Every structure is written in C-alpha cells, then in structure tokens.
C-alpha cells in the first residue's frame, strides 16, 4: 500500500480523490487554516498534528501567485522565492521529514509557464535530487464537466514510468451530471433571491470592467461543462432562471453526494472552501494514472524532466 500524506487541503478534495484508490493508505492531512481543520473531517479527512512517514506527499498550497486573476498582486520575489512562500515551504519540510519518494503540488495555470524558478528552488530544498514532471491539465480531462485548468508538479526520487493520460469521457451534459449527483440537501440559490431576474443581471454584468472570473455566468443544463468554480463568481441556471446552489458548485467541483450539506459552513466560507480545493475528480484521475504507476515496478523513462500540456 502507498502511504499518502496531504498538506494544505482546504475542504479536502485532494484527499478525497487520492484515498478512493484501493492502492492508497490515506494517513490524513496537515492543515494550518482553522476552517480546513473544522470542516474537512466532516468529509472523512483526518487532520494530523504531526508528520508521519509516507511514500507520497500531495499538497494544495494557495494558488493565487499563479492565478491570472491575482498574479499581478505579487512581487516577483514573493512568487519565485521559496522562502517568501511559507505554505510551499511547509510542503518541502513535510516531504523531507516524511521520507516521501514522490511529492505532488497543485497550483494555478500560470505555474506551467512562470513557475520554473520556484520549482528549481523546491528541487534544491528536497533531500534528494528529483526527477520532475510538470503537467497542465483541465478537469474536463478527468471526465468532470467543469473547465478548470491547473498545473500539477511531481517531484520523484526515481524516473517516471510510461503513463496513460488518455482523457475520460465527459457526461452527456451538465444537466445529466447534476441529475446523477442527485443531492437531496441544500438547493438554496446563491446569492439570495434579492436579485429577482438573475438572467438579466448576468447579461448586464458581462460587460462590466472587472476580471472575467468575478462576473456571473449563465450555464445551461445542455452545456457540456461549466466555467471554473471560484468563490467570487456565481452561475445562473438558464432553464430554471435561478442561481446555482452551494451543492451544485460542490457537484461540478467533483465533491461526492454523501449526505454532507455543503452550505453548512455558511455561504461565503463554503464557496471559498469548495473553490480553493483540488477537485476530487482530477485528484483521483492523477492518482490512478501517475501516482500508482510510479510506485509499480516497470520500465522507467531516462530523461530527468517532463513537461506535458493536456489542455
């Protein structure tokens, strides 16, 4: 069994996707944000207070430094210098203390093109000279109907094996996916019904001079996928002329319909916890296609670094 240890998981999406694989023994996750400590256990994630020995460390430190919406808010040294990024330093320290052979970090899409300096410093700070795999991938590639592009970086003690990164087929459309998810809990629209005509409101807001990711978006049940889920953007369901509920955001982020009321933390916090987390769907896909094969014996590629864009 592959012992897996998480760091900075927010609502626990990364852990949920990883632990679903039968080859994984999930140890839990080390969290510093109190809201993550409070809420991720409700979804079955054990929050740890100390580092345990592990084969695989996975982490989701804040991605704002490599997000298009917030990239310009950071000076170069805050983005490129490891010692200016405390949460990423946490990941390196946990990796070294745990003795892990494989470290996996998720970040924003711009890390693929702008993260080389930070990645090199992380490689230097590990207690082994790693082979590096950098992957740019959208959640649709894992069969989830949400267009969410992220960068995943793997640091391996050994070379990476041949991998099958074939895409998973998407559901018929967003409506079919939501019907199958079939939550019986919170369908209270977000924001509240104070805005009487959300279709008109979203249409008027589309030309407002703000970041695209903060404008409300109209989503049809017949679309093949939604926009990326971020805490500052709300979706309007075209056919029902209403805002998405918290449960529906959790659904298209890939969270399970297992009886948890995703609105329970309160709407602003719930939206932040859901949107900042790694999608369980992409976590599960990468565990199956990269992590498990990495620990299987087999032919290894000889080159030290791989860069793969699946978008």
Image (cartoon, rainbow, N blue to C red):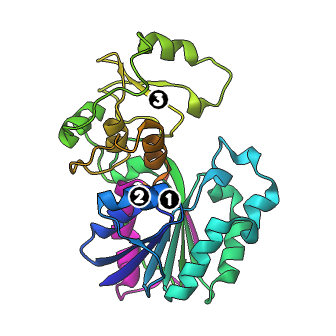
Left or right of 293, for residue 8? right
For the N terminus, the quadrant is bottom left
In magenta, the rendered stretch is: 279-307
Query: Label 1 neighbourhood size at 10 Å, few (<14), some (14-19), many (20+)?
Result: few
| 304 is within the stretch colored magenta | yes
**Image location (x, y in percent) of residue 166:** 36, 59
Q: Is there CB contact under 8 Å for labels 1 and 3?
A: no
Between disc 2 and disc 3, whose residue precedes? 2
Residue at (37%, 69%) from the top-left corner? 287
- Label number found at residue 12: none
Q: Is residue 227 left or right of residue 222?
A: right
Q: Is residue 74 magenta?
A: no
Say what secondary structure mark 2 lies in: helix
User: Does 1 appear above or below 65?
Assistant: below
Circle 3 sits on which residue? Answer: 234
Image coords of residue 118 (percent x, y):
71, 68
Residue 24 location, quadrant: bottom left
Q: Which residue is mark 2?
A: 38
Residue pictured at 34% horizontal, 55% vertical: 281
Q: Residue at x 46, y 10 (%)?
A: 200
How far apart marks 2 and 3 lie (CA) works out to 25 Å
Q: Secondary structure at mark 1?
A: helix
| Circle 2 crowding by C-alpha within 10 Å: few under 14, some 14–19, many from 20 | some
Q: Left or right: 28 with respect to 76?
A: left
Disc nearest the viewer among 1 and 3: 1
Cα gap from disc 1 to disc 3, whole angstroms: 25 Å
Q: Marks 1 and 2: CB-CB under 8 Å?
A: yes
Residue matched to label 1:
34
Residue 88 seen anywhere in this rendered image of the structure = yes
The one nearer the camera, 302 or 7, is 7
Number of numbered discs visible in the structure rendering: 3
């Amino acid at each position: 069994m592959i012992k897996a240890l998480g760091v900075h998981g927010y609502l626990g999406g990364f852990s949920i996707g990883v632990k679903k694989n039968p080859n994984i023994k999930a140890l839990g996750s080390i969290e510093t944000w109190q809201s993550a400590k409070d809420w991720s256990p409700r979804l079955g994630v054990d929050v740890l207070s100390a580092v345990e020995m592990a084969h695989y460390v996975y982490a989701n430190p804040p991605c704002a430094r490599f997000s298009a919406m917030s990239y310009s808010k950071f000076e170069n040294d805050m983005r490129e210098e490891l010692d200016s990024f405390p949460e990423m330093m946490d990941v390196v320290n946990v990796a070294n203390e745990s003795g892990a052979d494989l470290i996996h970090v998720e970040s924003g899409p711009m890390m693929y093109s702008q993260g080389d300096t930070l990645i090199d410093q992380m490689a230097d700070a590990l207690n082994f000279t790693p082979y590096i795999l950098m992957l740019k991938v959208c959640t649709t590639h894992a069969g989830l109907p949400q267009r969410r592009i992220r960068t995943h970086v793997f640091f391996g003690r050994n070379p990476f094996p041949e991998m099958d990164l074939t895409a998973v087929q998407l559901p018929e459309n967003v409506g079919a996916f939501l019907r199958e998810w079939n939550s019986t809990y919170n369908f209270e629209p977000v924001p509240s019904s104070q805005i009487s005509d959300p279709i008109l409101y979203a249409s008027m807001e589309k030309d407002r001079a703000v970041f695209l990711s903060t404008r409300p978006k109209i989503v049809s049940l017949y679309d093949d996928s939604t926009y990326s889920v971020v805490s500052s953007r709300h979706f309007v369901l075209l056919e029902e002329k209403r805002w998405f509920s918290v449960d529906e955001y959790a659904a298209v982020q890939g969270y399970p319909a297992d009886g948890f009321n995703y609105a329970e933390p309160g709407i602003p916090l719930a939206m932040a916890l859901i949107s900042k987390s790694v999608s369980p769907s992409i976590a599960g896909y990468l565990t199956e296609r990269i992590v498990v094969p990495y620990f299987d014996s087999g032919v290894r590629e000889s080159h030290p670094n791989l860069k793969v864009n699946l978008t």
